[in-house]
Image (cartoon, rainbow, N blue to C red):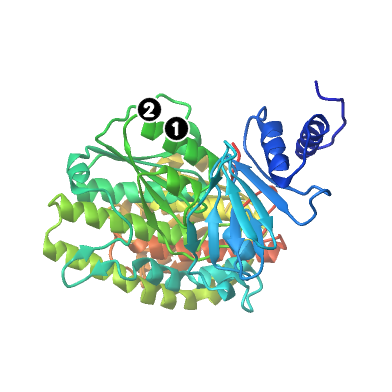
């Protein structure tokens, strides 16, 4: 029986449990202490990452993880522990990731790792290629604005070495799904949360149109509580910026139990989801510090396009000429994205006009609907304005009741087969005194006639335009938040990595 104790937080329970175990045990060495700690934590259920200091052994720190992320950094004359790579990137690029149940003993001499059985083990050490300077603000007022401006480079880094425009081929630096599995796929299921879900949903349109494979995206938090029908012909693509998202990890485990092949798209090397997956594609977005995801989102979209091209070629769906065209479209992205950032001042001016709003609607059709969802999410995350996204065709089935002069509507209307239908939706808003912001093609006079404000985005091709369209949506949300005076990088109640359910 443990002695009674009082606590204001669940974290303090760990200290009491360990102290109770120490009181009952004979501890004559550091190894004995490690064994006592592991024994004390056996009854604990759930996820945690702990740092433990014992005054009897002041020259060592113990770190133990179960479910929650924990990274050990190895310097020349020091060791570090953190929950995320950027926190210690300025000290070292050599990192090892603990596995569940591992306990790391950090001393001045180095680090020793023991598994849940108390046996000393060797965990692989990864060298992180990120530049520490890129994890600093670099003169920008917020990390979010810096990371928006880093997107052309992030796109370029994600494409680097992976495309041959002459041959129309895609290459990956890590082992990819074997051809026998690719040829056997009869369904693609994308699982993710938040912004990553929007990236997955956006890609569903092209996967079905180009590959002809039934493709759907599901919230990982809902997927795990159903009894989904999966088999060895299902390719599950799990998307996570951090690679530690608890709901996505649980969905990955469920998918593997049901025999599906799991491919993860992730920004964090050796993260938990990466290690749980069968295969991985890294996004190479670099460190993303701001809670609101920007460059991680666009590099996820780029990575999903690379997967599409690879599957299309290896299944014989895309011929060489088609592949050459699609690869060229992707290779043009960094330059066009860089030029697009020159419209920042215009977007800032529009954002100032609508910073007063308490509610906003985002509307789009077809592939632009998921982008409307992402635009609304960005706005509500950092400005705290209530924003909702709907397919534009669903507007008249309810949301149109909200329209008046005080509820601005942000339309995404670009190169698409349903463009004329979206213009008709815009006219319905205009007839009810609604204010319209339109994200549209350059020199689109028909849209300009209806909209109050227009943000122009050039078209490369409908298959990659979504990547470009996300940038003005991010800038608009950012400048609205700035005008409202909110904490852009650390919005209330939110965390960068959601490691709990």
Residue 70: tell me if it is visible. Answer: no
- As rendered, which of 281 and 498 lies closer to the eye? 281
In the displayed structure, 246 sits above or below 355; it is above
Q: Which tag, 2 or 1, sits closer to the chain's start? A: 1
Question: Alpha-carbon distance for marks 2 and 1?
Answer: 7 Å
- As rendered, which of 372 and 171 lies closer to the eye? 171
Tell whether 76 sits left or right of 121.
right
Q: For mark 1, what is the residue?
A: 223
Mark 1 lies on a secondary structure that is helix
Q: For mark 2, what is the residue?
A: 228
Asked if the residues shown at circle 2 and circle 1 are in contact, with their CB atoms under 8 angstroms apart, the answer is yes
Residue at 46% across, 38% down: 219
* Residue 321 location (% of width, % of height): 12, 65
* Residue 86 location (% of width, % of height): 59, 63
Q: Which mark is residue 479?
A: none
Mark 2 lies on a secondary structure that is loop
* Residue 468 location (% of width, % of height): 40, 65
* Residue 499 location (% of width, % of height): 59, 43
In the image, farthest residue toward the front = 28
- As rendered, which of 70 and 232 lies closer to the eye? 70
In the displayed structure, 467 sits above or below 33; it is below
Label 2 crowd bin: few (<14), some (14–19), many (20+), radius 10 Å:
few
């Amino acid at each position: 029986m443990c002695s009674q104790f009082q606590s204001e937080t669940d974290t303090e329970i760990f200290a009491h449990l360990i102290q109770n175990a120490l009181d009952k045990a004979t501890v004559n060495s550091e190894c004995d202490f490690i064994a006592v700690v592991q024994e004390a934590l056996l009854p604990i259920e759930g996820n945690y990452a702990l740092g433990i200091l014992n005054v009897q052994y002041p020259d060592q720190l113990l770190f133990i993880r179960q479910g929650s992320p924990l990274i050990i950094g190895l310097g020349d004359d020091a060791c570090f522990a953190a929950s995320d790579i950027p926190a210690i990137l300025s000290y070292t690029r050599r990192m090892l990731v603990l596995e569940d149940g591992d306990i790391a003993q950090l001393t001045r001499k180095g680090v020793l790792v023991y598994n849940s059985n108390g046996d000393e083990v060797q965990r692989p050490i990864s060298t992180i290629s990120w530049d520490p300077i890129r994890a600093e603000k670099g003169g920008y007022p917020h990390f979010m604005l810096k990371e928006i401006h880093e997107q052309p480079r992030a796109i370029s880094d994600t494409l680097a070495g992976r495309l041959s425009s002459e041959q129309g081929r895609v290459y990956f630096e890590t082992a990819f799904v074997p051809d026998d599995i690719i040829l056997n796929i009869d369904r693609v299921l994308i699982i993710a949360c938040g912004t990553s879900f929007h990236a997955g949903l956006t890609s569903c349109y092209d996967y079905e149109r180009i590959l002809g494979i039934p493709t759907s995206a599901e919230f990982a938090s809902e997927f795990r509580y159903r009894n989904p029908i999966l088999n060895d012909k299902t390719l599950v693509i799990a998307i996570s910026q951090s690679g530690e998202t608890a709901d996505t990890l649980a969905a990955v485990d469920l998918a593997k139990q049901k025999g599906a092949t799991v491919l993860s798209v992730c920004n964090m090397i050796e993260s938990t989801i990466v290690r749980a997956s069968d295969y991985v594609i890294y996004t190479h977005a670099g460190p993303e510090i701001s809670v609101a995801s920007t460059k991680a989102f666009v590099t996820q979209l780029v990575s999903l396009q690379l997967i599409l091209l690879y599957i299309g070629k290896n299944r014989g769906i895309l011929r060489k000429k088609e592949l050459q065209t699609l690869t060229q479209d992707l290779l043009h992205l960094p330059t066009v994205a860089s030029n697009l950032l020159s419209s920042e001042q215009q977007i800032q001016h529009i954002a100032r006009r609508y910073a007063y709003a308490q509610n906003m609607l985002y509307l789009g059709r077809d592939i632009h609907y998921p982008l409307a969802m992402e635009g609304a999410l960005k706005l509500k995350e950092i400005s705290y304005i209530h924003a909702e996204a709907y397919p534009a065709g669903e507007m008249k089935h309810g949301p149109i009741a909200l329209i008046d002069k005080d509820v601005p509507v942000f339309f995404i209307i670009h190169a698409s087969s349903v463009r004329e239908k979206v213009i008709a939706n815009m006219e319905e808003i205009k007839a009810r005194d609604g204010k319209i912001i339109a994200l549209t093609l350059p020199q689109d006079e028909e849209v300009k006639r209806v909209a109050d404000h227009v943000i122009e985005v050039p078209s490369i091709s409908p298959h990659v335009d979504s990547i470009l369209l996300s940038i003005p949506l991010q800038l608009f949300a950012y400048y609205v938040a700035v005008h409202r005076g909110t904490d852009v990088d650390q919005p209330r109640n939110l965390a960068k990595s959601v490691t709990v359910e």
